[in-house]
Amino acid sequence: MSIKIEQAIIHAVRQGQDGQLECRLRPQPLNHSVALDDLVGELHRLYTAKAGKGYGHFGVPLNAEGEPDGEANEAFLNAMTRWHKGELGFVEFSAQAGELLGQELSKYDFATGGYLLLASYSHIATQYLFVALLAPKPSVSVSDEMEVLGTEHLDLSNMQLAARLDLTEWQADPTSKKYLSFVKGRAGRKVADFFLDFMGCVEGVDPKTQNRQLMKAVEDYVGQESLDKHEAQEAREALFDYCKSQHDAGSAIAMKDVADELADKGLESFYQFTSEGDYGLEETFPGDPSTLRQLKKFSGTGGGVSVSFDAAHLGERVVWDPIKDTLTIQGVPPNLLDQLQRRAGKA
């Protein structure tokens, strides 16, 4: 993994004697070492692969109607901008960030602190600023003298409070709505609200909505082109393969690239079709694997029933009757058939 770490630092956010959270600052950056390379490299890998991330930008928070709700919190942005311009050292910038996070955490009863990591690094011609509050996890080790020692390590696999700023995109296009990504968590954005508030980040591009609209546009387009079932599925799979490769590489979906992929299948006017349609698609946006998976597979669970099948089987082995609200499956999978026969006493 070609990651070049420029600077990184860790500060401790702990409860003080008065019970309030305070940030204990490290006075100098972390020394470059194999351990630091491994840490930042693993965080980059885990974060890139993490599903369900949100995307946003620095700006004024909005209410449910999409109208301004309060004033922009620009303290983090101002400090970061000064650091990026060389007017503030990385240690000084990180210290200001630590103080801001401590102030924000103190507003919440559930806050327990952790280790604030800031890392400036580059990967494939893109410069990033990674910010995460990592939780410690108790562990046990054995010393050289065969003594059992209690210790703690950073729980990287359970990273819930993290954000990554694409400094390259932020500098090239300050009007972008997706240069700052963040972990949403299982409960949506609520868990990470305070973490985003301390950075002054507001949500921008919604990847799920963009991916659903892209799928709708493809379905409308293949319908307009009167493709047969095989040709339509080939177009869907070409889109899926492209989007998956982009996601795996940590890159965004680009509409012009999508159009090129479909042009290779003989569908040469997709870009014009989406530009003239009312799909609200950005020129580039993050891929959402769980949404795009529907291009190749149908699945659903409810009422004690789980069904999953390849999209290519729809209309052949699997027939849907929307009037009767039924699915008819031709050729029951062998392992399921065996279970049914055993229950019926025929095996």
Image (tube, grey):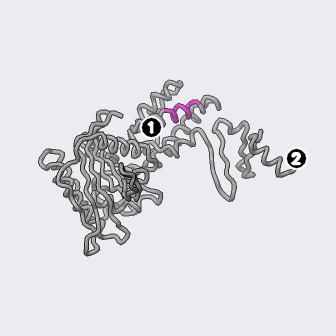
Q: Which residue is at the front of the view, 199 or 70?
A: 199
Is residue 178 found inside the magenta-colored segment of the image? no
Against 192, residue 238 (above or below) is above
| Nearer to us in this view, 258 or 119 | 119
Q: Residues within 10 Å of mark 1 (few under 14, many from 20)?
A: some
On the image, numbered disc 2 is attached to which residue? 346
**Type of amino acid at the residue the image marks with label 2:** Lys
Question: Which label was assigned to residue 248?
Answer: 1
Q: Secondary structure at mark 2?
A: loop
Instruction: Residue 332: give its label.
Output: none
Magenta span includes 236: yes
167 relative position to 261: left or right: left
Amino acid on which the number 1 mark rests in the picture: Asp
Locate residue 1: give its quadrant.
top left
Question: In this view of the protein, which residue sits in the foreground, 339 or 281?
Answer: 339
Quadrant showing the C terminus: top right
Q: Residue furthest front?
A: 145
* Residue stretch rendered in magenta on the structure: 234-241
Rendered residue at 64%/39% (across/down): 310
The Cα–Cα distance between marks 2 and 1, rounded to whole angstroms, is 46 Å
Rendered location of residue 181, percent (x, y): 35, 49
